[in-house]
Image (spheres, helix red, strand yellow):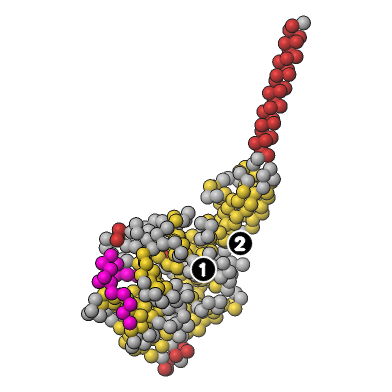
């Protein structure tokens, strides 16, 4: 009798244990979110919040994660990848289907239909909301204007092949003028004369000048120079006939050989010290109205900095990290979750808090306000080393420069 009761008690305890375990498992699973991602091509790399996971044989990626917002990144060589945020609900299965657009540039640049200029160099992008850009031949002796009408490319020479001795070009906002910094460090003002080759002119503009920045509203030019009365920041008219000394850097010993950049509204100038003592290099902002210079960083070692397109933020770089500074909160730099190459920083035409950057050969979008990758990703294009790129036609056309020349692809 006792043995029979013991067996019954054992079964009850075992059943209760199984029930409790099942209940706990149910509660645990009900508290989680499920995500299923079906991708094409199957060999894509898929990341959830920067963590890669593998697919099954059907090319389906599965994950069990916490409810809330998560970023899914899907990318593949020679495809336009995508990075997007999803809000996953508790106990709910979210299914995502991603078909990446294939990019198929020719392996041979000479025969590629997407080749714009063999050995060419990208110079600058056109005016805002236009679909044009400027580039040169391989010798930097002739400039061209490239324009896209949809996916139809048109090439127009804007100078004769007589340009020479150019080290750097500072373009006016209208692209009608340019400052040509020569290899002998003299600077000439070049007037394109609306591409009238016969009447184009090049006249001396200045010498013994460091960093130069042209105001986006085309009203004035800022530059660093030593005119014999001390190293200073000057504001000048376009011909540099009338200038004003607005900062004497002899009164700011911690600012050496500064880099200058304007804000998009032309009201502020970013000043970055470029001393050989890297710890001395900080970010400052000069107001053209108050004539005050304000320090925005104090910890030093900054190598580059730039305003975002609507002046809400400053993005500042150290050797391997990027930082975001709220324009209203100096000296409160926040480290970003990705390194942004400021030489290749492109503002999104619809959301100025989103930028696209070319870093280590990968072009990706980044949301400054949320400190997350956002938008599409291009990890590799025909195994070509991309050095510089522009987005045109509302992000539908990518123009890029490699050691082989200038190319373009459609991202639609």
* x and y percentages locating residue 154 in the rendered image: 55, 80
Q: At 62% across and 42% down in the image, what residue appears?
A: 64
* x and y percentages locating residue 373 in the rendered image: 53, 57
| Image quadrant in which you'd find residue 201 | bottom left
- Circle 2 packing at 10 Å, graded few (<14), some (14-19), many (20+), is some
Q: Which residues are magenta?
A: 244-260
**If the image is split into quadrants, where does the N terminus sit?**
top right
- In terms of secondary structure, where does tag 2 sit? strand
Hey, which residue is sitting farthest front in the picture? 290
- Given residues 302 and 137, the one toward you in this image is 302
- Given residues 139 and 235, the one toward you in this image is 235
Residue wearing tag 2: 101
- Circle 1 packing at 10 Å, graded few (<14), some (14-19), many (20+), is some
- In terms of secondary structure, where does tag 1 sit? strand
Q: CA distance from mark 2 to mark 1?
A: 22 Å
**Upstream in sequence: badge 2 or badge 1:** 2
Q: Is residue 377 visible?
A: no
* x and y percentages locating residue 3 in the rendered image: 73, 7
Residue wearing tag 1: 347
Image position of 140 (left or right of 253): right
Image position of 305 (left or right of 346): left
227, above or below 274, in the image: below
């Amino acid at each position: 009798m006792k043995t029979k009761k013991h067996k019954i008690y054992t079964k009850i305890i075992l059943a209760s244990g199984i029930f409790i375990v099942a209940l706990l498992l149910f509660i645990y699973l009900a508290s989680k979110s499920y995500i299923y991602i079906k991708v094409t091509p199957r060999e894509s790399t898929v990341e959830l919040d920067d963590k890669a996971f593998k697919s099954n044989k059907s090319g389906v990626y599965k994950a069990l994660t916490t409810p809330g917002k998560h970023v899914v990144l899907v990318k593949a060589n020679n495809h336009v990848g995508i990075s997007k945020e999803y809000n996953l609900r508790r106990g709910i299965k979210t299914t995502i289907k991603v078909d990446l657009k294939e990019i198929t540039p020719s392996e041979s640049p000479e025969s590629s239909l997407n080749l714009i200029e063999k050995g060419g160099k990208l110079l600058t992008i056109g005016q805002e909301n236009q679909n044009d850009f400027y580039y040169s031949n391989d010798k930097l002796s002739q400039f061209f204007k490239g324009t896209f009408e949809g996916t139809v490319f048109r090439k127009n020479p804007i100078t004769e092949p007589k340009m020479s001795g150019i080290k750097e070009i500072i373009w006016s906002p209208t692209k009608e003028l340019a400052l040509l910094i020569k290899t002998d460090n003299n600077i000439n003002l070049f007037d394109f004369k609306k591409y009238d080759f016969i009447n184009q002119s090049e006249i001396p503009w200045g010498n013994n000048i460091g960093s130069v920045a042209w105001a986006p509203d085309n009203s004035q030019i800022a530059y660093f120079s030593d005119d014999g009365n001390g190293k200073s920041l000057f504001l000048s008219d376009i011909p540099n006939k009338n200038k004003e000394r607005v900062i004497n850097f002899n009164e700011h010993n911690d600012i050496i050989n500064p880099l200058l950049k304007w804000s998009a509204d032309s009201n502020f100038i970013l000043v970055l010290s470029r001393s050989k003592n890297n710890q001395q290099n900080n970010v400052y902002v000069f107001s053209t109205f108050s004539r005050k210079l304000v320090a925005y960083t104090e910890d030093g070692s900054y190598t580059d900095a730039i305003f975002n397109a609507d002046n809400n933020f400053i993005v500042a770089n150290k050797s391997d990290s990027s930082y975001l500074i709220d324009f209203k909160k100096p000296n409160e730099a926040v480290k970003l979750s990705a390194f942004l190459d400021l030489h290749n920083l492109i503002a999104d035409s619809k959301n100025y808090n989103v930028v696209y950057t070319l870093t280590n050969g990968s072009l990706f979008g980044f949301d400054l306000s949320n400190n997350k990758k956002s938008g599409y990703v291009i990890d590799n294009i025909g195994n070509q080393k991309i050095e510089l790129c522009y987005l045109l036609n509302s992000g539908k056309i990518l123009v890029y420069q490699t050691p082989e020349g200038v190319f373009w692809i459609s991202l639609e």
